[in-house]
Image (tube, helix red, strand yellow):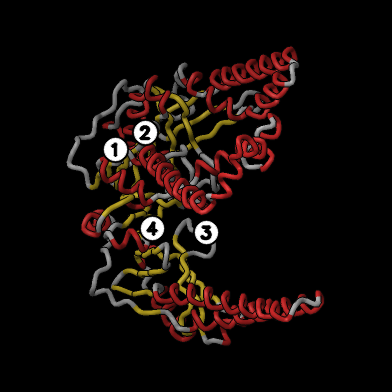
Amino acid sequence: MTADDAPAERLHPLALLSGIGRAVRNVVGGIAAGGFLAVQGRIGVALMIFAGIAMMTLGGLFLHWRRFSFRVGSDAIRIDSGIVSRNQRTIPFDRVADVSIEQGPLQRVFGIARVTLETGGSAAGKEEGVLDGIALHRAEALREYVRSMRQGLGASAVPASAPTAIAEAETPALFAMDLKRVLTLGFFNFSLAVLAGLFGASQTVGDALGIDPFKRRFWTPILEQNGLGDFLLAHRIGLAIGGAAVLVLVGIATGLLRTVLREFGFRLDRTGNGFRRRRGLLTRTDVSLPARRIQAGLIATGPIRNRFGWRAFKVLSLAGEGGGGGGRKGQEGRSNHVLAPLASDAEIAPIASHIGLTVPDASTPWRQVSRGYVTSALALIGIVTGVGAVGGLLFFVALNAPLQAYAWPPLFALAGFLALGLLRWFEWRHTSYALDGERLLIRSGWWSRRTLLLPLRNVQSVTLKESSWSRRFGIASLAVDVAGGRSGGQILPALPRDQARTIRAELLSAQP
């Protein structure tokens, strides 16, 4: 039975309740306007606005649910949607990379799930097939059915109407993180997102309500009471230290909270055709990643994490990232899937081996990029800071500034030159590459350190990049593209021009 002939199925009725939160976020502006009118004493108008918003929101949700249906056939899935303008989207099984399942807090209570059909062929940020609110057992049965049909099992496939899914045998996890490991990761994920959120909220509603803690007028009357301002002024050093300590504590707490919510219960399993990743405290995601869609591996770390031997292992894939956002995709379909957020080299090695990659070790033949990486940047920085210094001197001349003021522009220019030059030197020290058998390795970054593991079989194109400036220093860069990658690809910078051409020929000759 084809998808066009299959019986229509609807979303679970409880999907209406789980969709209210998203609908409210879409009308937050109207709610804020109603609140402002209520504060101004115009209660009647505010109530009319709230009633109109409620009717539009609930009515829109019901009409969307009533007009949304999907059909599962033996060849494809057809999704019918649209209230006034009707859309019929048919997704053949051979185009589906896998089926991702996600459950938010309310969805977990109601026993329903959001299902995303991962194809990797849609535009950035656009979801090709989403069933937002079907019974969890139906979601699991649908995933098993799509997998079996894609693998050509035919009659042995799980029926689309099966009330339960075939449970995957629980085997020892390929990689998992307990609560201690998750909390350790949280300490590294320092974030000031809470303060950023407060600032955004104050800008959104603070002016309307006359409350904005990020403006002086909010604090002036408070500081003038009981001599509090004089006390703080007298203890400003301690206040500065205390403020810095508060920022650090807020950053640590925010990092811990965000990490626990996202990575709690992290578990990575090996499946027949790739990996299965489950994680999340409130929003639980269950994502499968076929190995055939993995283009490259990426080991990420930093100076502090590296001191403790911790790494993160990701893969660049054609399939969309299903975690945390319901099918968020990378640019032009490629995504970074995290397979091990915090792991040692010994834990990363078996994961990489399942996709035909090996972790670099002491025997890896690393080669430093050209010193032109530093000298070309220093020459450009010198020109910019020199022009800045001359401009500063001319400005002081126009102002008839005191003689001692003329020392500041050269000092600032010299400080900027040294600081930027030192940063460039650090980058050069940590930028290298290796052609190791059937793979290209690119190591880059000083603070955010990345090691790319790229199988030569996945290289789609190699672009040699030069400019009039780089040619003066005898260097060129290579941009290596993989399938689904954005224009520009993975950059191998500052190679001697002859060597860049030789490497390009080697990469292209390695294609099957």
* Residue, disc 3: 486
* Residue, disc 4: 295
Q: What is the distance, in whole Å, between disc 1 and disc 2 at their CAs?
A: 9 Å
Q: Secondary structure at mark 4?
A: strand
Labels 3, 2: front one: 2
Q: What is the distance, in whole Å, between disc 3 and disc 2 at their CAs?
A: 30 Å
* Rendered location of residue 215, percent (x, y): 66, 42
Q: Are marks 1 and 2 in contact (CB under 8 Å)?
A: yes
Identity of the amino acid at label 1?
Gly
Which comes sooner in the sequence, label 4 or label 2? 2
Q: What is the distance, in whole Å, between disc 4 and disc 2 at their CAs?
A: 26 Å
- Residue 378 figure quarter: bottom right
Quadrant showing the C terminus: bottom left
Identity of the amino acid at label 2?
Arg
Q: What is the distance, in whole Å, between disc 1 and disc 3 at their CAs?
A: 32 Å
Labels 1, 3: front one: 1
Name the one closer to the observer, 275 or 109: 109
Name the one closer to the observer, 4 or 310: 310
Which comes sooner in the sequence, label 3 or label 2? 2
Residue sitting at x 26%, y 63%: 358
Q: Secondary structure at mark 2?
A: strand
* Residue, disc 1: 265
Left or right of 213, for residue 403: right
Identity of the amino acid at label 4?
Gln
